[in-house]
Image (tube, helix red, strand yellow):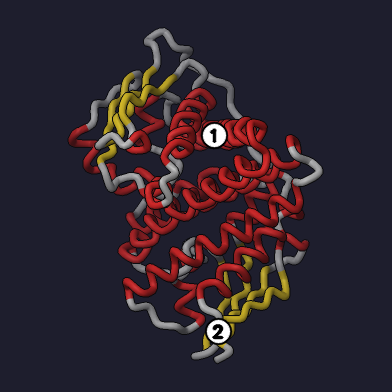
């Protein structure tokens, strides 16, 4: 089980995780546009649509398992990622709620996934992401539903205004979505306590990021098969460098210590919360054995686990070496290579 870290610590991990998801999308999109031109633009849109459809179906699975009606109020009150987690109280007071019509606002500073896009002047394709993502999630969740977003931060408006809608005569029942073999939907939605709710939303968001990476690879293999393997690896290298740069800025701003354990506990994915691990810690080394990983579990469901070694190795090795040249990472076991556990050692060499 995840160690019993505090709710405040988990809440502090949410913005970092959402910004990392934004970096994944930005790295993949830039590469597709730069290397494949107009065909790359089509690939980006297909990537978002498939990823969004998966999310809409997973939301329908979860909400049915939770005994919720499949409507707009359920969708917004029980969103899949951490992007809305800290907005719930504000939305309860200021949002407009009914099963067929929900209106909520995200103010400037409230959309963490878009912050790397703003820093990189990535506005246009950030807006494409928002436009394609939300509509495709919504229609995959309920075929009669739609969302209108008249103002968005990615168009440099002062806020996002979301209007989620279904006609009153929308079908009352929708088709259940089959579970993956061994999938326990409710595992990701435990919320009997504030601690469970925060831990679950971090796990769900990490799972969603795994799906984003899966569908990037799927699109590359389908639309650009000759270049797919090399291109995916190149994107992972660029992504690792970008993630490391962001972590270095956080380290400097927050005065993190330079020990290997601090790199692990402040990683841009909330590994200290969501992984089931055994750890050995010394001043110059942390050794981690990972028994459960939601990224690996998600890739196994989607049939791509054996193709994700490029991500796993470049994410750990690339981020660590770019973050701190004195860190050395050894991955002697990895679920993406068929091992039962991931076995990672992070050492400080000087």
**167 in relation to 177, above or below:** above
**158 in relation to 191, above or below:** above
Q: Residue furthest left?
A: 93
Q: Is residue 2 left or right of residue 100?
A: right
User: In x, y percent, where is residue 178?
Assistant: 64, 32
User: In x, y percent, where is residue 280?
Assistant: 56, 84
Tag on residue 265? none
User: In x, y percent, where is residue 348?
Assistant: 55, 86
Depth check, front residue: 10 or 326: 326
Residue drawn 79% across the image and 41% down it: 225
- Pointer 1 or 2: first along the chain: 1
Residue drawn 47% across the image and 55% down it: 20
Tag on residue 326? 2
Q: Is residue 232 left or right of residue 71?
A: right
Name the residue carrying label 1.
52
Q: Is residue 281 left or right of residue 158?
A: right
- State the separation of the CA atoms marked 1 and 2: 39 Å
Check if mark 1's residue and mark 2's residue have beta carbons within 8 Å: no
């Amino acid at each position: 089980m995840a160690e019993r870290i505090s709710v405040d610590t988990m809440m502090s991990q949410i913005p970092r995780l959402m910004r990392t998801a934004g970096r994944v999308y930005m790295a993949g999109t830039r590469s597709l546009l730069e290397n494949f031109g107009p065909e790359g633009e089509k690939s980006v849109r297909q990537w978002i649509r498939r990823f969004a459809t998966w999310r809409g179906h997973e939301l329908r699975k979860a909400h049915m398992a939770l005994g919720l009606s499949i409507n707009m109020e359920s969708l917004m009150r029980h969103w899949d990622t951490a992007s809305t987690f800290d907005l719930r109280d504000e939305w309860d007071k200021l949002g407009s709620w009914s099963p067929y019509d929900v209106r909520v606002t995200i103010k400037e500073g409230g959309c963490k996934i878009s912050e790397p896009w703003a820093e990189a002047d990535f506005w246009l394709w950030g807006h494409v992401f928002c436009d394609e993502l939300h509509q495709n999630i919504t229609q995959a969740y309920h075929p009669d539903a739609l969302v209108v977003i008249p103002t968005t931060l990615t168009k440099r408006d002062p806020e996002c205004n979301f209007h989620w809608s279904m006609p009153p005569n929308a079908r009352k029942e929708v088709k259940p979505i089959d579970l993956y073999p061994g999938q326990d939907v409710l595992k990701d939605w435990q919320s009997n306590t504030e601690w469970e709710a925060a831990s679950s939303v971090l796990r769900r968001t990490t799972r969603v990021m795994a799906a984003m990476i899966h569908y990037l690879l799927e699109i590359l293999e389908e639309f650009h098969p000759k270049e797919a393997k090399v291109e995916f690896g190149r994107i992972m290298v660029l992504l690792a460098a970008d993630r490391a740069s962001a972590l270095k800025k956080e380290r400097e701003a927050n005065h993190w210590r330079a020990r290997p354990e601090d790199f692990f506990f402040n990683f841009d994915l909330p590994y200290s919360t969501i992984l089931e691990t055994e750890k050995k810690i010394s001043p110059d080394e942390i050794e981690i054995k990972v028994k459960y990983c939601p990224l690996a579990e998600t890739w196994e469901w989607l049939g791509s686990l054996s193709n994700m070694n490029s991500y796993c190795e470049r994410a750990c090795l690339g981020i660590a070496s770019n973050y701190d040249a004195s860190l050395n990472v050894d991955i002697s076991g990895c679920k993406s290579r068929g091992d039962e556990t991931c076995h990672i050692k992070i050492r400080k060499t000087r």
